[in-house]
Structures are given as structure tokens and as C-alpha cells.
Image (cartoon, helix red, strand yellow):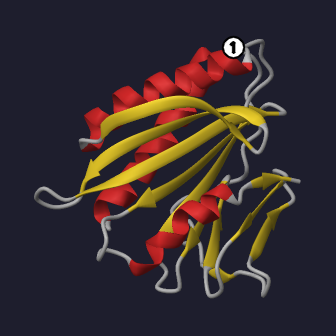
Amino acid sequence: MKPQSLLIIGVLAVALVAVLAILPPGPAAPQPPGPGEGEPAPAPTPAPLPENGTYINTTYGYAVTCPAGWFFTESGESVWFSSPVKHEEVRINTIPLPDGNSSREAILETLNATYAEDLGTDIGAVWVSTEKTALDGIPAYRSVYSVPIVESDRYTFIIRYAVRDDIVYSVMHTVFPEGYDSYNADAAAVAESFEFI
């Protein structure tokens, strides 16, 4: 769905800018090489999850378990998990932080304030709540937004974000009204299955 895609893209951009803005200047983090000039970047391709349904990311040290028939797609520091109809249900973003002296709490507070302000401005998301929580035992925030679909219909967008070992982890999922997406009922359980390894 178009509103969901816009929201996810906005969240990625907002999170990166917000985190980098609060960090003191320092050497830039190395960037992966891009495609040659004039060459389009290859589109990421969904891949089936292993038979046990568990995706393991050894680069960033986490695992997620999905129902049978789901797919994962890796693109840079984002991995999204899609239902058998290949509709994105859950996304995990990792943002490595450059060396700096900002505290974990300062980074989380900045992300929280930035999400609440910018998501409302960009796509009409309405902030519903934010609470301190944990992401697999690591102090985190959990923010909830209500996002318009069509006419008076709205979906709920939930983000949990934490900092571990100088990396911001954001675990996002959607909750659609009944009848929009029969597979979306599993999204919350997939997001909750996130664990550090």
C-alpha cells in the first residue's frame, strides 16, 4: 500500500538525520561503494525464509522468526519481512553510529521527538503514544502512530527502537484494520520475536 511505503521511507530518512544531528562531528563512517555512474541500483529481491522460519542477521547480531511461507528482503542496513503475498509487514533498520559521546538516552529521546514531529508533517500520521520499554532486554522506546489509508480508514504503525553497541535498532510493524490484509495479524508476533544473538 502506498501510504505504508511512504511512511517506511520517511522513517528511515528521519531516523538517520535525527541521530547524526545530535552526534558531535567526527570522521565520516565508510560508505559502501555505489553503482557506477549512470547505472541503476539493483532492486532487492525477496528470498524465502529458511524452513524453520528464523532469519538470522550475523552482521548486526539479531534474529526474527516468521510464519511459514514468509519472505525476507535485505537492502543495505534494512531488512523487511513480507507475507506470502509479498506485502511488507515488518521492517528492521540498523543505523551504525559514528564514534561520539552522545548517551543512549539522548539518542533515543532525539529519535522519539523527531518521529513524533516529522511523521505527522510528512504523511499525516498522528502520534498516539510513546512509552519507555525494552527491545530484548535493552532500554528502548515504543511509539505508536495512526496513519490514514483512505477516507476515514487508518492503520497503526508501531516502532520500537534501542541503541546497542553503537547501533540504533528500529523494529517496525503495521496493524491494519480487519479485511485489509489477512496476513497482517502475524506482524506483531514477528516484531515481538526480535532477539539479539
Q: Which residue is mark 1?
A: 25
Whether residue 42 appears in this view of the structure is no
Q: Residue at x 77, y 38 (%)?
A: 30
Image position, residue 33 (x, y; %): 71, 53
At label 1, which amino acid type do we have?
Pro
Q: Can you tell which quarter of the image residue 102 is in?
A: top right
Q: Nearer the viewer, residue 1 or 43?
A: 1
* The residue positioned farthest toward the left in the image shown: 151
Identify the image quadrant of the N terminus: bottom left
State left or right for residue 41 relative to residue 192: left
State left or right for residue 71 relative to residue 131: right
Badge 1: few (under 14), some or many (20 or more) residues near its Cα, within 10 Å? few
Q: Residue at x 30, y 63 (%)?
A: 2
User: Circle 1 sits in a helix, a strand or a loop, which is it?
Assistant: loop
Q: Is residue 145 above or below residue 174?
A: above
Q: Is residue 106 above or below residue 19?
A: above
Q: Can you tell which quarter of the image residue 189 is in?
A: bottom right
Whether residue 161 appears in this view of the structure is yes
Q: Is residue 171 above or below residue 27?
A: below
Q: Nearer the viewer, residue 36 or 126?
A: 126
Q: Residue at x 62, y 79 (%)?
A: 71
State left or right for residue 153 relative to residue 168: left
Q: Can you tell which quarter of the image residue 31 is in?
A: top right
Q: Residue at x 23, y 59 (%)?
A: 149
Image position, residue 188 (x, y; %): 55, 60
State left or right for residue 99 relative to residue 177: right
Identify the image quadrant of the C terminus: bottom right
